[in-house]
Image (cartoon, grey):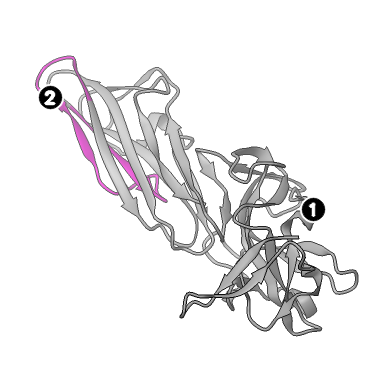
Amino acid sequence: MSRFFAFDPVSHRRTLQFVDELPLINLATDQVLCVPGGRLTSSATNPLADGFNFSTLRYLPYVHNLVPLWNSSLNQWIYREISSVTAVSISNLTTNRISDVCLYVDAADGVVKWATRAWSTNTSREVALEESGIYYLNLGSGNLARATYLGSVYMTGTANNARCNDNSAQRFLWNAYHPAKQILARLLPASSWTYSSSTLRNMNGSTANRVEVIDGIGAEVLDLTFNVRASMGAGVYGQFGLGIDSTSQALGLITAGGATAGIDTTVTQTVSLQPGLGYHYAQMLELAAVGTITVYGSSLYTGVQGQWRC
């Protein structure tokens, strides 16, 4: 049982009260009374936990313990407790592709079940997201005609062994409801490296030096701070910047260097933008405008940090 209050959005007055004695299995309404109250997570106990290479997805209570689900027989929304939703394996999802994650009630046995659908590309859905008080996807007939959308995942790995990451470098699990600000960070582990070309390249020659995110709606804002510590000889200059979905073009370039030999300096670039629907990354880039630059990492000096709501 759950405790939940519904409010009229115009009068801002309480219109309905769910109390511990109310049998939710008998509750059905023409209009959605609440958005889903939980969060998708890799953890069995923590709805805000980071996850590394996980293949089991869970839905845990966060704001409240209810999830609205469409019942095509009643032509109404019904409500179930999130605690009744079991974990699901996502190891068979399409790799290197975003998939939507939904819940529905099986009309045959009344059990809450999972449904997924891969996107056609990583920036466009195969099945359009619809809204009627909450987000849902038409994934078929009957109760699947309005499968309650919870969020999206991006899978890596190999076929039938797909894995998901939801950590500071790769935010590949996105919640449609109750998104939380999560840390984004990639600090370069190499102690130092040099570069002497004026061609813009991936920092230290690696595509691993980036942060990656997904957005199921396309409304989130990406806030990042990019710090670079570098050493220059006399008259040597280097330039650095973040490439948004690009390894060859920076959003802007910051310059480090000076006339004094052996100058050691730290420069900073800040970025705030709305990358849009789907998968996106911010790649650290560098070039040597004049001479040979030396850049310092050690997971301390050079890297990108920020936040992402997911």
Q: Secondary structure at mark 2?
A: strand
Q: Residue at left 42%, top 29%?
A: 187
Pick the front one: 143 or 207? 143
Q: Residue at left 42%, top 23%?
A: 299
Q: Is residue 2 magenta?
A: no
Q: Is residue 193 above or below residue 24?
A: above
Pick the front one: 291 or 263? 263
Mark 2 lies on residue = 258
Give left or right: position of 175 versus 76: left
Specify the amino acid type for callout 2: Gly
Name the quadrant containing residue 178.
bottom right
Considering every residue shown, the one lying at the far top of the view is 262
Residue stretch rendered in magenta on the structure: 237-265
**x and y, in percent, of residue 252 in the image:** 25, 46
**x and y, in percent, of residue 180 in the image:** 50, 50
How many residues crowd around disc 2 within 10 Å: few (fewer than 14), some, or many (20 or more)?
some
Q: Residue at left 47%, top 75%?
A: 12
Q: Which mark is residue 86?
A: 1
Numbered disc total: 2
How many residues crowd around disc 1 within 10 Å: few (fewer than 14), some, or many (20 or more)?
some
Specify the amino acid type for callout 1: Thr
Tags 1 and 2 in contact by the CB under 8 Å rule?
no
Q: Would residue 127 be visible to someone looking at this image?
A: no
Name the quadrant containing residue 71.
bottom right
Name the quadrant containing residue 30.
bottom right
The CA span between labels 1 and 2 is 60 Å
Q: Is residue 244 magenta?
A: yes
Quarter occupied by the N terminus: bottom right
